[in-house]
Image (cartoon, grey):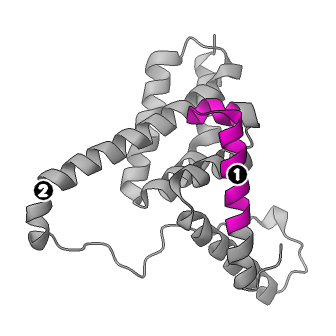
Amino acid sequence: MATEQELSDFLISVEKRAFKRSLYHVRDAEAALDIVQDSMMKLCEHYSNKSVTELPMLFQRILSNTTLDWFRRQKTKHALFSNFNEFESDSQDPDFDFLEVNASSSGMAQSDSAENILSQAQNVAEIEEEIKKLPARQREAFLLRYWEELDVSETAAAMGCSVGSVKTHCSRAIQALYSALKAKGIQP
């Protein structure tokens, strides 16, 4: 059974990655934050009696299910209120970028020039944009495998699919990212 401190440490360790993953899926910062917070609450309420080693898989599954629930609610909301679209205003500024590129000073050499740092930040932004364009299941498999660093069987369990499906989704995601980034002049 995880102690309160272990549970708290776990939630702190996954908070930022979970937010970014949710943001990739829903493309709305407020909704992504709500999804992550709901997922964390569900983990604490229902699974605080589990061991620390079980928490990562449980949390990934909860996060996936909470994201799916959000999409279902949005679909219902849009179906119910589709006639009111002309009354809604677009409150999002199209120039505002929710994804921040946080360059860690520990990861960069002191001698990096401003040009190199800017180039790296632009490459990261391009990669993030291409990840957003992936189909939902490919994006989910890719993020779980390479962002969350889950193995194939853990990813399959989190996504609720077979190991073969995870391999297929990841392969297609990597091929699509490679092609798109190569077309933009970014070499792997």
| Residue 99 position in % (x across, y down) | 54, 67
Q: Is residue 156 magenta?
A: yes
User: Is disc 1 placed on a helix, strand or loop?
Assistant: helix
Q: Would you identify the image quadrant in which residue 121 lies?
A: bottom right
Q: Mark 1 highlights which residue?
A: 170
| Residue 156 position in % (x across, y down) | 65, 34
How many residues crowd mark 2 within 10 Å: few (<14), some (14–19), many (20+)?
few
Check the image and report above or below for 78 versus 56.
Answer: below
Q: Would you identify the image quadrant in which residue 14 lies?
A: top right
| Residue 165 position in % (x across, y down) | 65, 41
As shown in the figure, which amino acid type bears the numbered disc 2? Phe
Q: Residue at x 73, y 50 (%)?
A: 146
**Number of labelled discs?**
2
Q: Residue at x 42, y 55 (%)?
A: 26
As shown in the figure, which amino acid type bears the numbered disc 1? Cys
Q: Is residue 112 magenta?
A: no
Check the image and report above or below for 42 versus 28.
Answer: above
Q: Would you identify the image quadrant in which residue 109 lies?
A: bottom right
* Magenta-drawn stretch, dominant element (helix, strand or loop): helix
Check the image and report above or below for 10 versus 133.
Answer: above
User: Is disc 2 placed on a helix, strand or loop?
Assistant: loop
| Residue 34 position in % (x across, y down) | 38, 45
Q: Which of the two discs, 2 and 1, sits closer to the camera?
A: 1
Q: Which quarter of the rendered picture does the C terminus lie within?
A: bottom right
